[in-house]
Image: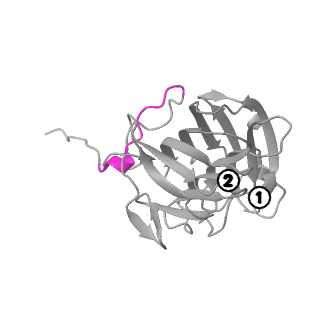
């Protein structure tokens, strides 16, 4: 009798990603060659962690009163990450897991695929970050458009105070310097953008390629010296860059890795 395959649970669905043929269609019983998750943002924040209502399975860090996450009444499921006070350098970020433990580790032949689809309000200068990071109980984005104090990350980010307000790719390994690569792609308010990272290779030639709307942006590639070798987790973050209320709305977040 042939075995009937099936999904284990909704958080492990990944779906074929156009132009990324190597992303597994689904994580199913069998050889379990891949692991990962797909967060469709269907469930509203219900977990009270330290007085903050956080989406299930995620850890939240907030700087600034009245900053919170709300389920958005939109087709497909969205979360709106609101910075509520209107003060400069308010912060709100979410990290998969408990905020301290990483589960995705760069290794020979074990490709990592990360992708998220989001949009931001951008009434003024704003800092946004999304990607893979060594989790910590600290703000990932620096105040006033500075370089992140975090170590070990691969992220898309925008920084306030830049002459050209656009998206950038950044990589930092351990105590090395962060490499900040301009993608020459403008950030546009209230407009969806798909941000993807693919980590591949073998020691010492690991590279992280950055995709915008599923098109490779060669200028964003981070080489071995910038590819972290510690356990990482997906995250999204927002920080105001001016005195004004801002928000980030997230459609989905996906991450998968070959075992």
Seen at 67% across and 39% down, the residue is 123
Q: Tell me where residue 89 appears, x and y as whole percent.
A: 72, 57
Give the position of the N terminus as an image quadrant.
Answer: top left
Q: Viewer-proximal residue, 36 or 206?
A: 36
In the rendered structure, find residue 143 and report the number of the disc placed on it. 1
Does label 2 or label 1 sit earlier along the sequence?
A: 1
* Quadrant of the rendered image containing residue 211: top right
Q: Position of residue 198 (x, y in %)?
A: 61, 40
Residue occupying image coordinates x 58% and y 55%: 84
Quick check: 158 left or right of 196? Answer: right
Find out whether residue 177 is within the magenta segment. no
The residue depicted at 86 percent of the width and 37 percent of the height is 163
Vertical placement of 122 versus 57: above or below?
Answer: above
Cα separation between marks 2 and 1: 8 Å
Could you say which is closer to the camera, residue 85 or residue 232? 85
Quarter where residue 166 is shown: top right
Label 1 residue SS: helix
Give SS at disc 2: strand
Q: Residue furthest left?
A: 1
Magenta stretch? 8-19
Residue at the disc numbered 2 = 239
Report the predominant secondary structure element of the magenta stretch: loop
The reply to whether discs 2 and 1 touch (Cβ–Cβ < 8 Å) is yes
Would residue 20 be seen by someone viewing this image from the given angle?
A: yes
Indicate the position of residue 233 as horizontal and vertical percent values. Answer: 56, 57
């Amino acid at each position: 009798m042939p075995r009937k395959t099936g999904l284990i649970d909704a958080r492990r669905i990944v779906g074929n990603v156009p132009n990324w043929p190597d992303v597994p269609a689904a994580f199913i019983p069998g050889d379990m060659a891949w692991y990962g998750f797909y967060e469709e943002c269907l469930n509203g924040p219900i977990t009270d962690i330290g007085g903050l209502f956080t989406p299930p399975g995620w850890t939240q860090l907030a700087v600034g009163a009245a900053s919170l996450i709300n389920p958005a009444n939109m087709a497909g499921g969205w979360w709106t990450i609101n910075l509520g006070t209107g003060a400069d350098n308010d912060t709100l970020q979410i990290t998969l897991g408990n905020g301290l433990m990483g589960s995705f580790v760069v290794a020979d032949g074990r490709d990592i695929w990360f992708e998220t689809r989001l949009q931001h309000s951008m009434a003024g200068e704003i800092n946004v970050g999304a990607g893979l990071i060594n989790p910590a109980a600290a703000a990932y984005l620096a105040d006033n458009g500075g370089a992140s104090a975090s170590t070990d990350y691969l992220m898309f980010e925008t920084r306030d105070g830049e002459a050209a307000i656009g998206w950038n790719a950044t990589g930092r390994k351990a105590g090395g310097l962060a490499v900040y690569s301009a993608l020459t792609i403008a950030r546009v308010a209230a407009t969806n953008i798909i941000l993807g990272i693919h980590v591949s290779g073998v020691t010492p030639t690991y590279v992280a390629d950055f995709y915008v709307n599923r098109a490779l942006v060669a200028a964003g590639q981070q080489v071995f010296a910038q590819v972290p070798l510690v356990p990482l987790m997906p995250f999204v973050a927002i920080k105001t860059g001016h005195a004004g209320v801002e928000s980030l709305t997230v459609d989905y977040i996906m991450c998968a890795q070959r075992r």
